[in-house]
Image (cartoon, rainbow, N blue to C red):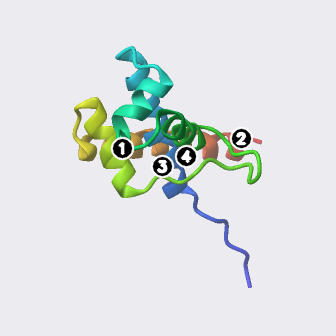
Amino acid sequence: MEKRERDDCPQRVERAFVDIITRRADLRGYGKGEFAAKMWPWMEPKTAATRWCSIREKAVHTGKPQSVSLADAQRMADALGEELSYLMVLAKEEALKEQRAFKGKGAKA
């Protein structure tokens, strides 16, 4: 039986989404803690900042960033005043572009 490669396109979409959110928050001049407080205003600011950090960066104990729930994705879009559906389309396009570039490099090697 032929071993099939795992398609990580959904994971790439999630990471592209987080990158887009991060860039747009930076462009608006939000600090990391400030943006986290806009997403989770009911949390203590330090807790919200830690949560945002765990989504953006790799966790020490797992080596992977925390996944983004649909609810948190909507909170991120709302904090930026943008439509979640539009941001998801951008993320998918970015992920597909990355996937094509990755496959192109593999074919040339």
Label 4 sits on a secondary structure element that is: helix
For the residues carrying marks 3 and 1, which lies nearer the camera in this image? Answer: 1
For the residues carrying marks 2 and 3, which lies nearer the camera in this image? Answer: 3
Label located before the other in sequence (3 or 1): 3
Label located before the other in sequence (2 or 1): 1
For the residues carrying marks 2 and 1, which lies nearer the camera in this image? Answer: 1
Label located before the other in sequence (1 or 4): 1
Q: Residue most toward the bottom?
A: 1
Label located before the other in sequence (2 or 3): 3
Which numbered circle lies on residue 14?
A: 3
Label located before the other in sequence (4 or 2): 4
Marks 2/3: CA–CA distance: 27 Å
Q: Mark 1 is on which residue type?
A: Trp
Q: Is residue 5 left or right of residue 101?
A: right
Q: Mark 4 is on which residue type?
A: Gln
The residue that appears at 52% across and 34% down in the rendered structure is 49
